[in-house]
Image: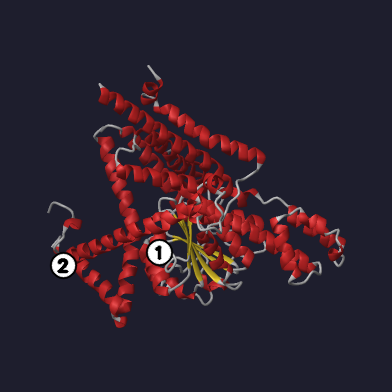
Amino acid sequence: MNLIDRMANLDRRWIFLMMGLAVGIPIIVIGITGKTLPEEPTPLAQAAFDVLDDLDPGSRILMAWDFDPASEGELGPMATSFIRQCAQKGHRMYFIALWPVGAQMIRSSTSRVIGGYYPDLVYGKDWVDLGFKAGNEAVIKTIVTDFAQYFPTDARGTSVDAIPMMEGISSLADFDALVNASAGYPGSKEWVLYAATPLKKPLVIGCTGVQAPQMYPYVPNQVQGLLGAIKGAAEYESIVNKWVRSEQLLDALESGGITEPASSELAARFTANPTEASTWTTEAAAAAMSPESKTKLIEIATAPIPGIFLEAQRRMGPQLVAHLLMIGLIIAGNIVFFATRRRGGSQ
Amino acid sequence: MKRIVPLWITAIVGLVLIVSNFLPGTRSWGEEATTWFGIIAAVAFVLGGGSLLKVHLKKISDRNTGWGYSMIVLGTFTATLAVGLFKIGVSPNPGYPDVPWSGDVQGQGTPFWWVYEYVFKPLTATMFAMLAFYIASAAFRAFRAKNFEAMLLLGTAFIILLGRTFAGYFLTSWIPIDGPFSGLRLEELSVYIMQVFNTAGNRAIIIGIALGIAGTSLKILMGLDRSYLGGGD
């Protein structure tokens, strides 16, 4: 039996093993080294970031988490980054879910990001969990005109009248932007058709790879930012990480007495090259800063990014190897196919 | 009667929803109908549970193939339902310590949370993750360049598979990003395919589906299509 025959009769368990290794080995390597692959953000990811960045701090953002644990691998990191950008910017976040387990997704993402990194945000003032509501697109259609009809209380049973940030919210029109993390129906498409388009509200979508091709036709008029699959999540995550670092550096520089425009220019430089911060603090230009401010600046510039904010970029490693394996398998399968066909033709 | 009443309800509600989109004075009628839909959707959860019970109890009673799995379905269904409905193991809300059922059923540490965190979540994630193995097997066995169309599909698949990873950037990063050929970089090419070819095809499909939905909806509203009422008497 030659190689072609062996490959033609290859037990599919070998392919399963290869896929297992293709995903497993990069996970272990990235877990040990902590290194991630560099990301070059596409205009769509940048647009998603810009929609939320262009709004004034304190804007009202409706965050619809329409996914479940099956798609958390793709959408969880997007949800994390959406919350991080809004929290850092100072937006008010209103979480809802049209999927039954979306409620758990809200709890898990808010407890990890807000609970872990923005403990100063006050529940009911800066963010609120309004939970899951049954009814699919009917929920959207109703809250377009009457928000309280579907959401008279939050997920904890507190009346919305007793929640300070719900004051002035009577319909979806009172929000400044909509953010949706979606794994299917009801999800992105319904938010486009029944909310963002009729209300002409900015909409940012994070969706699974399977859904993304169906959402591209709505870009850019009905959907302003689109993150497709883990690649979109990784691009957006890298933008948010750089921006947060830059904001923190800017704060440190300004509190140390460095004013605009020098502070902005320096923040951008240190974000791109963190080691420059320690060199710069020894220069004459940094003489105005106190030793404590300099130490704080160096700490911010060189501090490692918490793992929770690198989840998407870490997952690009297994995705790379798995995709290469897929290409290899397709090529191998075609070699076997043509070789077998030629042999069959000559017989 | 069993068929005429649902036909009339469908026709009236459907027409109200259409009219409310065009006549501002009738908008509140549409909102009312949507509220009814919300109530029915909530009741549908109960019906769904009832239907699940009926199907699996029958399977167990008839000792059909795989009736053991039906036992597992019913066992886990009733256990989860009881844990959630009766708030088993949930401590009262600190604000209302005297009200035994005032606690948060989904709060961390409750049995309902435990079922979600350690049963539902790993199971659904595992099911989805298994797709990777079957796709790999299918890639080896089924993705053949048998004709021109299949070759086009293969070429597109390669561009997207590479363009959505660092490999795309690595392989074509030598093409200047500001130059006239920047569109040939794999990451750019994959975005171009998604935004242009995919959008063109998808828009055509969306328009076709919309026309089909409009036609089917009219047939349902006029009572010409009664398949949604089910068979029998």
Q: Which residue is drawn at 45% across and 35% down?
A: A328
Side of A248 where B67 appears, left or right: left
Q: Can residue B45 be seen in this view?
A: yes
**SS for tag 2?**
loop
When the figure is inspected, residue A237 is found, relative to residue B119, above or below; the finding is below
Residue sitting at x 21%, y 71%: B12
Which amino acid does the dot numbered 1 rest on?
Answer: Tyr
Disc 1 with disc 2 on a shared chain: no
Residue B225 location, quadrant: bottom left
Q: Nearer the viewer, residue A215 or B158?
A: B158
Residue B222 disc label? 2
Residue extending farthest to the top is A1
Q: Is residue B205 above or below residue A313?
A: below
The residue under the point 23% across, 72% down is B15
Considering the image in quadrants, where does the C terminus of chain A appear? Answer: top left
Which chain does the residue under circle 2 lie in?
B
Q: Do the residues labelled 1 and 2 touch (CB within 8 Å)?
A: no
Q: Which mark is drawn over residue A96?
A: none
Three-letter code, disc 2: Met
Q: Position of residue B91 (x, y in %)?
A: 56, 52
Instruction: Using the image, determine if residue A254 lies above or below residue A226.
Output: below
> Which chain does the numbered disc 1 sit on?
A
Give the labeled residue for mark 1. A218
Number of other residues with Cα within 10 Å of mark 1, as a class: few under 14, some 14 to 19, many 20 or more: some
Closer-to-camera residue (A129/A205): A205
Give the percent coordinates (x, y) of residue A61.
Answer: 53, 68
Asked whether A52 or B75 is in front, the reply is A52
What is the x, y in percent for residue A160? 51, 70
